[in-house]
Image (cartoon, rainbow, N blue to C red):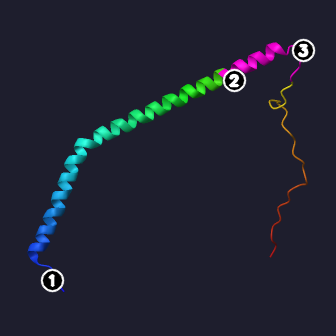
Amino acid sequence: MQLASFSGFVRTLFYMIMFYYVFKFLAKLFLPILVKKAVEKASENFQHQQQYAQQQYTQQQYAQNNRRYNNQDEIIVDTARSKNPKETKKVGEYVDYEEID
């Protein structure tokens, strides 16, 4: 079994501090570039999603307009937007009981 020497401890401590400063230096160089690329990629994905959503909305509006003009004899009743909410059944009255000592 080997015992740790003072010089080995100092050398290990030196390597750890050196690694910290090298990593810090490289992070200052390369991290802004990586963040910039990530932001550009996210912006590009967002623009593609917006364009796709706009195309879907335009196609949906076009289909609805064609349906309205092609079927003029047909009456469409939209019950989903009715303003009369459904009534809930009233089962009974709520009674609050107090305990008597």
Specify the farthest residue to the front.
1
Q: CA distance from mark 1 to mark 2?
A: 77 Å
- On the picture, is 25 further left or further right than 39? left
For numbered disc 3, what is the local secondary structure? loop
Residue position for label 1: 3
For numbered disc 2, what is the local secondary structure? helix
Q: CA distance from mark 1 to mark 3?
A: 97 Å
Q: Is residue 44 above or below residue 100?
A: above
Specify the farthest residue to the left.
7
Q: Residue 77: image x %, image y %?
A: 86, 25
Q: Residue 85: image x %, image y %?
A: 83, 36
- On the picture, is 54 further left or further right than 7? right
Pointer 2 or 3: first along the chain: 2
Disc 2 residue type (three-letter): Gln
Image quadrant for the N terminus? bottom left
Disc 3 residue type (three-letter): Asp
Residue position for label 2: 60
Mark 1–mark 2 CB contact (< 8 Å): no
Which residue: 34% across, 36% down? 36
Q: Residue 28: image x %, image y %?
A: 23, 44
Q: Nearer the viewer, residue 79 or 68?
A: 68
Image quadrant for the C terminus? bottom right
Q: Residue 38: image x %, image y %?
A: 38, 38
Pointer 1 or 3: first along the chain: 1
Pointer 1 or 2: first along the chain: 1
Can you tell which quarter of the image residue 52 is in?
Answer: top right
Per the rendered image, the range of residues in magenta is: 59-76
Image disc number at residue 41: none
- Please tell me whether the stretch drawn in magenta is mainly helix, strand or loop: helix
Residue position for label 3: 73
Which residue: 49% across, 28% down? 47
Q: Is residue 2 above or below residue 38?
A: below
